[in-house]
């Protein structure tokens, strides 16, 4: 399982990469591996205002469908439209293929997310 050190992680296996006031959100390598072959991704709408814990979208694989939850409150600035035609990109490299970019409205929520070490321990449990 691949875990990158410079990211935040959730218990639902989403990752967050912060660049200035933007949060890039995707699913972790653990999540894509657990789901198996991903065949469909439902993306949020740009300009959606979401609170931490709201449903961000849905990922469907040959095994199951799984809701994605937004790890941090804010407004959806951008979605990765490539995933509509090529959902398998999440299997190929889940850390290079974000799902959405969120304008962070409350940076203190980052304190509630896990770092790479804590996330690795969480996945090993």
Image: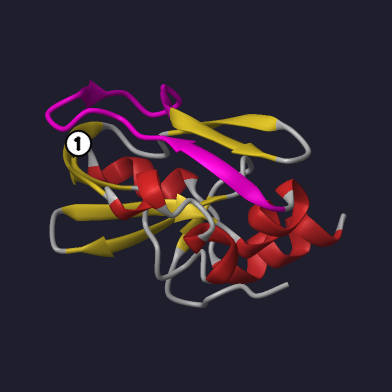
Label 1 crowd (10 A; few <14 / some 14-19 / many >=20)? many
Q: Is residue 33 above or below residue 107?
A: below
Seen as rendered, the residue at the extreme front is 85
Q: How many marks?
A: 1
Q: Secondary structure at mark 1?
A: strand
x, y percentage for residue 115? 53, 64
- Is 116 placed above or below 65 here? below
Front-most of residues 107 and 39 = 39
Instruction: Say above or below: 25 vs 105.
Output: below
Q: Which residue is mark 1?
A: 76
Q: Residue 74: give x, y in percent of width and height.
A: 21, 33
The type of colouring in the image is: secondary structure
Residue 82: give x, y in percent of width and height.
31, 54
- Relative placement, left or right, of 45 versus 10 is left
Q: Is residue 100 left or right of residue 48?
A: right
Q: Is residue 125 left or right of residue 42?
A: right
Q: Left or right of 43: which side holds 95?
A: right
Report the residue at 49% width, 49% height from top: 113
Residue in view at x 52 percent, y 59 percent: 90
In the rendered image of this protein, does residue 62 appear above or below residue 37? above
The residue that appears at 76% across and 51% down in the rendered structure is: 34
- The residue shown at (47%, 39%) is 41
- Along the line of sight, the residue nearer the viewer: 51 or 77: 77
Q: Quadrant of the N terminus?
A: bottom right
Q: Quadrant of residue 2?
A: bottom right
Closest to the observer: 83 or 122?
A: 83
Verify whether residue 24 appears in magenta. Answer: no
- List x then y, in percent, for residue 17: 34, 63
Viewport quadrant of the C terminus: bottom right
Q: Magenta stretch: give its range.
A: 37-56
């Amino acid at each position: 399982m691949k875990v990158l050190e410079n990211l935040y992680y959730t218990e639902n296996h989403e990752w967050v990469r912060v660049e200035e006031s933007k949060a890039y959100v995707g699913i972790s390598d653990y999540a894509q591996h657990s789901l198996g072959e991903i065949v469909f991704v439902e993306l949020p709408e740009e300009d959606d205002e979401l609170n931490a814990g709201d449903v961000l979208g849905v990922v469907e694989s040959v095994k199951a469908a799984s809701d994605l939850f937004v790890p941090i409150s804010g407004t959806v600035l951008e979605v990765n439209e490539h995933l509509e035609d090529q959902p398998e990109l999440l299997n190929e490299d889940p850390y290079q293929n974000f799902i959405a970019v969120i304008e962070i409205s409350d940076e203190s929520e980052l304190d509630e997310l896990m770092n790479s070490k804590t996330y690795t321990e969480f996945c090993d449990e």
